[in-house]
Amino acid sequence: MVDPGGLSHRGVEHVFVHALRVLRHDEFVDVVRRALRRGGVPSTKEPGLAVLHPRAAGPRPPAGARGDLLFSLEGEQCVGDVTVVHPGAITYCRVAATTDGGAAAVRDADKSSQYRRYGAGCYRFIPLTVETFGRLGKPFMDLVTDVASRATQHGNGTFTREQFVTGVLRELSVCLCRQCKFGASCRWVLCSS
């Protein structure tokens, strides 16, 4: 079966699944940015890495290279990159079967090495990895708890550190569930047509 645009049914499904991943990714970036803002941490979306990189600091990143978030912690520029990984994927299943959070740890290491090539000494890179079953990578969880500590210092006693962390984790969980449900229902529609 070929649709009017020239794509097969499988091609339409591939384009649609890619669009769902982008939507999920962007929603996670927004959740993290809201948490940073509530914690009193200024941030901006999609910083160009070449702008953050001084000319004398070694190889420059490609012109279009971007992070997902730029924010400042204790006067240090930080770049965050959000990634959602599935522990059952071929790349991660072996380590995920033996280690809690193994898929996130593998992806964190991979992302860190990608960013280290261009940003050594220019900014601190923080991989923001979440597994599809909800576990956050260690650097991501460390960021959430750090921002929670800042938020409670500046929150005038309106909430505790634990309440802040729980709220952020719930928001991320709802985002993940909503995207999984939406993706599954849309795939059912594609497969049944």
Image (spheres, rainbow, N blue to C red):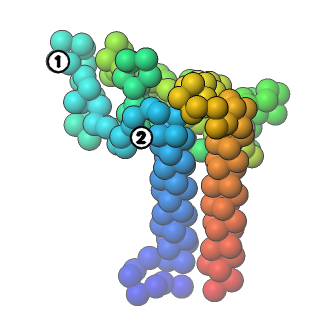
Report the quarter where the C terminus lies: bottom right
Instruction: Give the left or right position of residue 165, taking residue 40 as reference.
Output: right
Report the quarter where the N terminus lies: bottom right
Instruction: Kindly indicate the quadrant of the structure image that contains residue 44.
Output: top left
Q: Please say whether residue 106 is visible from this viewpoint.
A: no
Q: Is residue 121 above or below residue 183?
A: above
Instruction: Kindly indicate the quadrant of the structure image that contains residue 60.
Output: top left
- Callout 2 secondary element: loop
Q: Residue at x 69, y 32 (%)?
A: 160
Q: Residue at x 48, y 63 (%)?
A: 19
Expressed as whole percent of the image width and height from the top left, the position of residue 72 reads 39, 26
Instruction: Give the left or right position of residue 169, taking residue 42 as reference.
Output: right
Task: Mark 2 or mark 1: name the one nearer the start of the chain.
Answer: 1
Q: Please say whether residue 178 is visible from this viewpoint.
A: yes
Q: Amino acid at mark 2?
A: Asp
- Farthest residue in the front direction? 156
Expressed as whole percent of the image width and height from the top left, the position of residue 130 reads 64, 40
The residue that label 1 is drawn on is: 55
Number of numbered discs visible in the structure rendering: 2
- Callout 1 secondary element: helix
What distance separates the C-alpha of mark 2 from that of mark 1?
22 Å
* Circle 2 residues within 10 Å: few <14, some 14–19, many ≥20: many
Instruction: Kindly indicate the quadrant of the structure image that contains residue 71.
Output: top left
Q: Residue at x 47, y 33 (%)?
A: 40
Q: Amino acid at mark 1?
A: Arg
Report the disc number at residue 68. Answer: 2
Expressed as whole percent of the image width and height from the top left, the position of residue 43 reads 39, 37
Comparing labels 2 and 1, the label whose residue is closer to the camera: 2
